[in-house]
Image: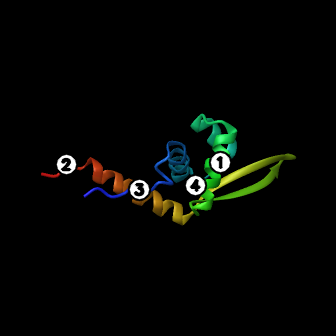
Amino acid sequence: MFKDLNPILHSQLRLAIISILIGVREAEFTYLREKTNATAGNLSVQINKLKEAGYIDIAKQFKDNYPQTVCRITAQGVAAFEEYVKDLRSYLEIKK
């Protein structure tokens, strides 16, 4: 039987954000925007959804007098991603 896929991670942009953060653990907003090719507004909305789910933490700070937003994946985010990948693999397995 197929498992339900996590609706938070099943969005293309949110999955891309989490996938990037799995590899680097934390990234600046501008880095995520460049890597995902998303608009700043859309990226901001999707980052906030991930934060509300507890999958990432957001730190706002200043660097050289410019605002900087840093996103960090949480342990809950790592676990959710691993579960999502496991559930997705169940769709790919051919059972005889």
Asked whether the beta carbons under mark 2 and mark 3 sit within 8 Å of each other, the answer is no
Residue bearing mark 2: 94
Residue bearing mark 1: 45
Pick whichever of labels 2 and 3 is earlier in the sequence: 3
The percent coordinates of residue 96 (x first, y second) are 12, 51
The percent coordinates of residue 93 (x first, y second) are 23, 50
Which secondary structure lies at badge 3? helix
Please give the label number shown on residue 84: 3
For badge 1, the amino acid type reads Val
The percent coordinates of residue 67 (x first, y second) are 81, 47
Which secondary structure lies at badge 4? loop
Res 51 → quadrant: bottom right
- Tell us which disc is closer to us: 1 or 3: 1
Q: Neighbour class for label 3 at 10 Å: few (<14), some, many (≥20)?
A: many
Q: Could you give the CA–CA distance between mark 2 and mark 1, rounded to whole angstroms?
A: 37 Å
Pick whichever of labels 2 and 1 is earlier in the sequence: 1
Horizontally, is 22 left or right of 40 in the view?
left
For badge 3, the amino acid type reads Tyr
Q: Could you give the CA–CA distance between mark 1 and mark 3, rounded to whole angstroms?
A: 21 Å
Q: Could you give the CA–CA distance between mark 1 and mark 4, rounded to whole angstroms?
A: 20 Å
Pick whichever of labels 1 and 3 is earlier in the sequence: 1
Query: Which residue is painted at 31% across and 51% down in the image?
Result: 89
Residue bearing mark 4: 25
Please give the label number shown on residue 92: none
